[in-house]
Image (tube, helix red, strand yellow):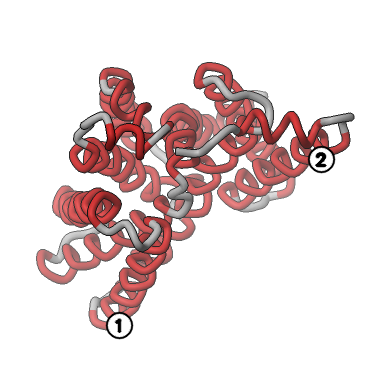
């Protein structure tokens, strides 16, 4: 245990912070059917960081780098919110996929122009979880606490839109504004999280625990408890495995989260009547 704390204490704390905020955001994302919002926003943030590197000679961990990355995410949040409300013929998930492809192409182009641009792409994909510092943990704790407080204060309109978008529109809720707020908050978390853990781990924390929770519960409180428990168990198991076999931390954590989801799915299917009950637990997606 002492060796685990000494070697992986800070990565573990960083993962716990991400589990806390991404586990909650993932339930919203799953209900809104915007599964790949994480990858798209991470790719857009990477483009912003590379632009900062080109324009201001700023590294990804600098204030200018974070500022440009977050500005790109805010612009994307405004675009997604507007498109969902105004362009009804195209599913938002398709729009997200297109923006990801365009952002990926732009990143590849800029990588060829920017000296050392490949470093930004590698860090975005793999992160630097093993080398997490107290500075990373403190920054994550402060930012995630602020975002968590915003989610708590705004849970009424954000939750209503996630549960029933069309009903919210019919009731006169300002869906464009609240969607913009939601995507901006999620984008802020993703911009910081990807720098620490990489896209693969962040995507796993965002989607897998919330998906597993949908197999067993329908209420927000129960789903959140299951999602958090799943994230903690997957993190501990993945980090122990990585330490024991000298394996990469991020892929190990993501793999164990995926294994937990697979086992949970098999358990539901193998239980008598489990498939029907699982469908009831998921409920309609708004």
Q: Secondary structure at mark 2?
A: helix
> Measuring 61% from the left and 35% from the top, which residue is drawn there?
235
Q: How many callouts does the rendering have?
A: 2
Using a 10 Å C-alpha cutoff, classify the residue at mark 1 as few (fewer than 14 neighbours), some (14 to 19) or many (20 or more): few
Towards the viewer: 8 or 253: 253
Residue 117 x, y percent position in the rendering: 30, 72
Please give the name of the residue rendered at 29% of the width and 81% of the height, measured from the top-left corner.
109
Please tell me in which quadrant of the rendered image residue 95 appears. Answer: bottom left
Label 2, residues with CA under 10 Å away: few <14, some 14-19, many ≥20: few
What secondary structure is found at the residue carrying circle 1? helix
> Could one spot residue 186 in this view of the protein?
yes
Corner quadrant of residue 150: top left
x and y, in percent, of residue 115 in the image: 25, 77
Which residue is painted at 62% across and 30% down in the image? 213
Relative to 87, say whether 5 is above or below.
above
User: In this figure, which residue is indicated by the disc labeled 2?
Assistant: 266
Image coordinates of residue 112 in percent, x first then y, are: 30, 82
Q: Image quadrant for the C terminus? A: top left
Judge from the rendering whether residue 283 lies leftward or rightward of residue 78; answer left or right: right
Quadrant for the N terminus, please. Answer: top right
In this picture, residue 226 sits left or right of residue 94: right
Q: Is 75 on the left or on the right of 222, as rendered?
A: left
Sequence-earlier tag: 2 or 1: 1
211 or 47: nearer the viewer: 211
Q: Which residue is mark 1?
A: 112
User: Which of these two is toward me, 189 or 277?
Assistant: 277
Coordinates of residue 45 in the picture (x, y in percent): 28, 57
Please tell me whether mark 2 or mark 1 is closer to you in this view.
Answer: 2
């Amino acid at each position: 245990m002492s060796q685990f704390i000494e070697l992986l204490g800070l990565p573990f704390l960083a993962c716990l912070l991400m589990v806390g905020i991404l586990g909650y955001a993932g339930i919203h994302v799953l209900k809104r059917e915007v599964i790949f919002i994480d990858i798209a926003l991470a790719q857009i943030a990477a483009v912003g960081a590379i632009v900062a590197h080109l324009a201001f000679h700023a590294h990804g961990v600098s204030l200018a780098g974070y500022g440009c990355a977050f500005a790109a995410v805010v612009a994307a949040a405004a675009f997604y919110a507007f498109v969902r409300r105004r362009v009804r013929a195209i599913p938002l998930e398709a729009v997200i996929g297109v923006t990801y492809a365009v952002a990926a192409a732009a990143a590849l182009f800029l990588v060829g122009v920017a000296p050392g641009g490949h470093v930004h792409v590698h860090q975005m994909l793999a992160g630097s979880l093993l080398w997490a510092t107290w500075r990373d943990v403190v920054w994550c704790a402060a930012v995630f606490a602020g975002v968590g407080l915003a989610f708590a204060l705004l849970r009424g309109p954000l939750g209503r839109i996630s549960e029933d978008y069309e009903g919210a529109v019919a009731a006169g809720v300002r869906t464009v504004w609240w969607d913009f707020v939601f995507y901006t908050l999620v984008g802020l978390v993703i911009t910081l999280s990807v720098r620490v853990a990489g896209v693969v781990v962040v995507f796993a924390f965002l989607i897998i625990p919330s998906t597993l929770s949908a197999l067993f519960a329908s209420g927000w409180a129960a789903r959140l408890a299951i999602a958090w428990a799943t994230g903690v168990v997957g993190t501990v198991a993945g980090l122990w495995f990585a330490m024991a076999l000298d394996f990469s931390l991020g892929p190990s954590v993501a793999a164990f989260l995926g294994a937990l989801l697979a086992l949970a799915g098999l358990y539901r299917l193998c239980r008598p009547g489990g498939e029907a009950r699982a469908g009831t637990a998921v409920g309609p997606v708004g």
